[in-house]
Image (cartoon, helix red, strand yellow):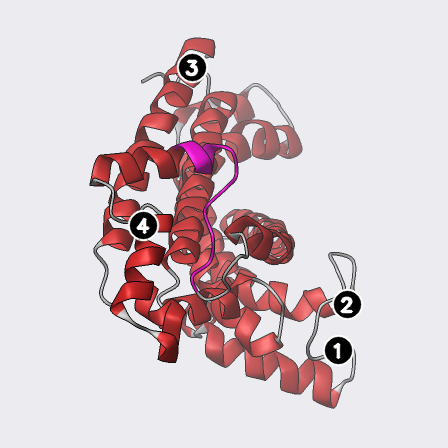
Amino acid sequence: MFYYILRRIIWTPILLLIISLIVFIMGLYGPGDPVEVQLGQNYSEERAERIREAKGLNDPLYIQYFRYIGNALKGDFGESYKYPSKKVSELLKPKLVVSAKLFLASIFITILLGIPLGFYSALRQGSWIDPSVVALTLVLYAMPVFLIAPVLIIVFSLELGWFPVSGWGGFFDKRIILPAITIGIPGVAVLTRIMRASTLDVLGNEFVRTARAKGLTDLVVNYRHVARNALIPVVTILGFSIAGMLGGALIVELIFGIPGVGRFALDSIFSRDYPVIMALTLIGAISLIVANLIVDIFYVILDPRIRY
């Protein structure tokens, strides 16, 4: 297992370099002139040339790229074009902390509800519980985030008055509950369906019948033999679903007025603030690569027979 994990870790910086190069080229040759955006009505060719020279925008591509990577490794993503003299890292850090807390809460809800619900549904195949769960997941999966959020606000905030409707108070504040549920609901539907199908597949294997024939209790068979093997494809889907949750989190932050990266990213796109856009893209790519690395490690933990 050690050599497998080591190989995956070695590949990680190579993938990050490839992604960073693509992002850098897109940011460098993207539409619009960021210097012109920065100067606004004060634009003149002389001023623009001075700024390009000061920021090193006239240097060859490879020099700009390696300079950017060297600074990024130190946590310095350059200065914002929209907010002169402001470091991108200073602008992003508090917003990323908020978004990360919201994302962790939504992941917790997805795993806490999706996996047990799918496992229980498979064990109750043939009863009314199984088709009811399947129908519920279809409904939840079909509902987009921008529809789920208003429904939750109307029911649990305006009508019942259980939760505040907007703002941010931290990870343990009530205001995180509705946004986290909104982001996590589609993931719950996906994990429930995958966990149900995977569990039904494992239940039909010979080793399960052998375990029952040995006289093992249903609790031991279900949770030691069935659940552990059924989790392997679920872990795979969980790694890929992170990308969808990140996209949904941006919309939810706008709806609930959460001071995360959602509004900031949108404003940066419209103002062509390329250093911010590039930093967000790189951070998102790093998050996905690390998440998939964790998923690969969990493969071996769940089933030591897996080797690549």
- Tell me the SS state at disc 2: helix
Q: Position of residue 114 (x, y in %)?
A: 55, 53
Q: Which residue is mark 4?
A: 53
Q: Quadrant of residue 99?
A: bottom right
Q: Pick whichever, 229 or 92, lies toward us.
A: 92
Q: Pick whichever, 123 or 143, lies toward us.
A: 143
- Foreground label between 3 and 4: 4
**79 drawn magenta:** yes
Q: Position of residue 192 (x, y in %)?
A: 49, 54
Q: Pick whichever, 141 or 129, lies toward us.
A: 141
Residue 136 visible, this orientation: no
In the picture, the disc for residue 6 is 3
| Span shown in magenta | 70-81
- Foreground label between 2 and 4: 4
Distance from disc 1 to disc 2, alpha carbons, whole Å, reads 7 Å
Label 3: few (<14), some (14–19) or many (≥20) C-alpha neighbours in 10 Å: few
Instruction: Name which of mark 3 and mark 1 comes first in the sequence.
Output: 3
Q: For the residue marked with disc 3, what is the amino acid?
A: Leu
Instruction: Name which of mark 3 and mark 2 comes first in the sequence.
Output: 3
Is disc 1 in contact with disc 2, using a CB cutoff of under 8 Å? yes
Residue pictured at 37% horizontal, 27% vertical: 13
Q: Which residue is mark 2?
A: 174
Distance from disc 3 to disc 2, alpha carbons, whole Å, reads 41 Å
Distance from disc 3 to disc 1, alpha carbons, whole Å, reads 46 Å
**What residue occupies the far front of the structure in this picture?**
46
Q: Which residue is mark 1?
A: 164
Instruction: Name which of mark 1 and mark 2 comes first in the sequence.
Output: 1
Instruction: Note whether 122 is above or below 307 in the view shown.
Output: below
